[in-house]
Image: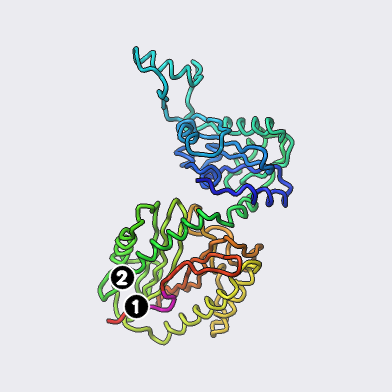
Amino acid sequence: MAYLDRGRAEQLMAQENLDAIILFAPESFAYATGCPAGVATMWRKTGAVAVLVPADPAISEMAVVSDLFAANFRKTSHITDIRESPIWVEATNLEGVILDGSAVDIIASAWDTAKRSSGFERPTTFDPERCYAHLADALSERGLTKARIGIEADAISARDLSEISRILSPAQLVDASDTIHRIKMVKSDPEIANLRQAVSISECGLKAVHQAISQGVSRNQLAAAWLTGIHSHPDHVRLSGNWEYISVGTNPWGGNAKIQPGDLIKVDVGCLVDGYSSDTGRTFVYDRPNRLQSSLFDALMSGFEAGSKLLAPGVALSEVHRVTQNAIRSAGFDRYTRGHFGHGLGAGLGSEEWPFISADASVEFEAGMVIAFECPWYIDGVGGMIIENQVLITETGHEMMNTLPLGLGVIPT
């Protein structure tokens, strides 16, 4: 399923005076087309695939697709203007070819149908110039040869930019990375459904971790309990991945410590559904917390509660950062500092995507955003602590998408 909202894209492109945008990253390709980008993107080099999205919704989109995946793309994507780019894999389509006669004649007939010339040679991996040439042709056909084109510069290396500029000349290429981030920032209903399902599965795993906490249980055993828990969820077949950052004891950064009385257990976990990652964090203590642990956690909770009250449309993300950090500092830790208190969620490379709830954030919350709001603290010699919920920004405020208690979970001996 494609998630790109052309109406939102049109609005944001108009604000930047863009006539079209070109997407290059594999995640952006899937977002715009509803199809995986394919194996040629494994090196994350520009030019394996691309998507052209004109600002005018009356002008059709165009996708450059690896030839190996073109047939499936035609069956799956809403985009009908498809330009194929050959990759290294030799593949032949015999659908619709009469299979009588010799193998040589059958294959030759298939190659003729595909208009393969006698001198055709496959590239070592893929040919980025072929991709850029397809883009140039598509711009020309749409009357955009000299237009202002936004490119996904985040996905382009310095060595590729000059070649892209040369082949797409005389189009004026500008960095549209921020515009593309903003298009993705507000989620569609299907994207929200993916994230809702992901956090539901994740909480099943978090419950299993909670139940597994006992004296002598190791960090790795808790990680195994996490996996068992998420796979016990009735919809676990929808999982496309999972991750965990679980720590035990006074070292918040790793090791395979075994739980002892007084230990903190930090659980920061996520599940992926159709590539969309949830993000949840909870903290437990085995036996009972000491005074230091309680004071630190209470300060984080003060920050979480203060910041949560501001999670609504029209509120600047920078203001949430200021209020959250000030609340923690007001609890007595006046030099506590954190770069961001949360981030967008989606189908990026990791569990965190733009925008960030940071002091320098330049955007306001909008209805339809899904974010992770978090207050963590990692203290060598004490342990890791985190309070983190997945939050949907609604028209009137917000919805906490998690259901499990936020407080410090005390596990009795």
Of the numbered discs 1 and 2, the one sitting upstream in the chain is 2
CA neighbours of label 1 inside 10 A, class few (<14), some (14 to 19), many (20+)? many
Q: Which mark is residue 356?
A: none
Magenta-colored stretch includes residue 407: yes
Hey, what amino acid is under mark 2? Ala
User: Residue 324 at x, y = what percent?
Assistant: 57, 75
Disc 2 target residue: 257
Main secondary structure type of the part rendered in magenta: loop
The foreground one among 15 and 136 is 15
- Please give left or right for residue 52 compared with residue 77 in the image: right
Hey, what amino acid is under mark 1? Asp
| Picture residue at 54% right of the left edge, 39% below the top | 78
User: Residue 181 at x, y = what percent?
Assistant: 60, 53
Q: Which mark is residue 263?
A: 1
In the depicted structure, whether residue 155 falls above or below residue 142: below
Query: Magenta span covers which residues?
Result: 405-409
Judged from this view, the residue extending furthest toward the left is 216
- In terms of secondary structure, where does tag 2 sit? loop
- In terms of secondary structure, where does tag 1 sit? loop
CA neighbours of label 2 inside 10 A, class few (<14), some (14 to 19), many (20+)? some
User: Residue 286 at x, y = what percent?
Assistant: 32, 79
| Picture residue at 50% right of the left edge, 32% below the top | 126
How far apart are the alpha carbons under marks 1 and 2? 10 Å
Quadrant assignment, res 64: top right
Magenta-colored stretch includes residue 157: no
Q: Are marks 1 and 2 in contact (CB under 8 Å)?
A: yes
| Picture residue at 35% right of the left edge, 80% below the top | 410
